[in-house]
Amino acid sequence: GLDNQCTSYQTIGTTLDGGFAPWMRAPARALWPISPDVARDDAALFEPLACAVGSVKRAPFQAGDNVAIIGAGPMGLLFALLYRSMGAGKVIVLDMASYRLEFALGVGVDAAINVAQHDAVAEVKRLTGLGADIVVDAVGNQIGTAVKLVRRGGQVILFGLRAHDNPQVNQYTITRYDLTLHGTFVGLHPFAQTIRMLESGAVQPAVLVTHRLPLSALGEGVRLMREQGAMKVLIETHL
């Protein structure tokens, strides 16, 4: 039942060739129909949104909970959009890039903290009182910071992937303050729920799209993402 933990895990466009091509062959079981009423750009972001949906399901949430998200890139902001749609109290994002932080404010987060200029822990506690109810590490090496941002008895979602980083963490803090850590990888069976969210209009991820490029300019799109000159780039195969 743990499809996302299959010992022979494969996914088209990551471990298998595909994705950036005019046509792609996939098994029928991998295809999920989305209503034509959903805007194409929203539907195009179905897969990354599903990853965030699957992760959010792991950490019990109540409307009004304060959420801090480390990393204001596309995935971090998908988490922000989700938690906002679910009725979060304050949605706070943290990053070092001014472009991303300004963009985050534009899509409705309550606070965007530049960790290179401010004491992140002090700022989150100032905004929330005791710390965030839920902290999401959308970077992949911020577990040490995450356990400092979360309130006592709070929860941490470890979503980002950085296979070669080995961040330090104070285990005493986790034990003493009853913290719950959730390791989440792409989500377990999140697709049906994600489609319902898209079809209801509860979340519209296309607000993150800043550039549309033809397939022939794929390299330019990759460069923009690496240099943080874009938030989300859509590659159009028919241009």
Image (spheres, helix red, strand yellow):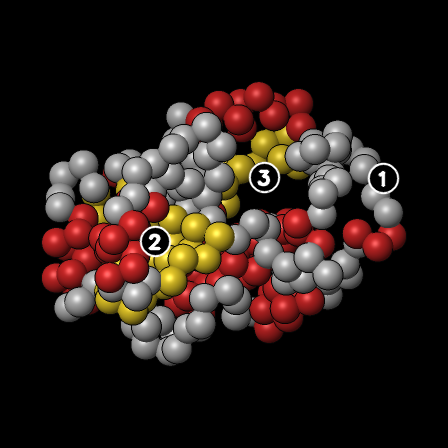
Residue at x 38%, y 33% (from the top left corner): 166
Rendering coords of residue 227 (x, y %):
40, 26
Sequence-wise, the earlier of marks 2 and 1 is 1
Q: Quadrant of residue 135?
A: bottom left
Rendering coords of residue 130 (x, y %):
17, 67
Number of the label disc, if any, that sits on residue 234:
3
The amino acid on which the numbered mark 1 sits, given as a three-letter code, is: Arg
| Closer to the eye: label 2 or 3 | 2
Secondary structure under the numbered disc 3 in the rendered image: strand
Tell me the residue that label 2 is attached to: 69
Tell me the residue that label 1 is attached to: 25
Residue at x 52%, y 53% (from the top left corner): 184
Number of the label disc, if any, that sits on residue 230:
none
Q: CA distance from mark 2 to mark 1?
A: 35 Å
Image: 234 above or below 126: above
Front residue of 20/186: it is 186
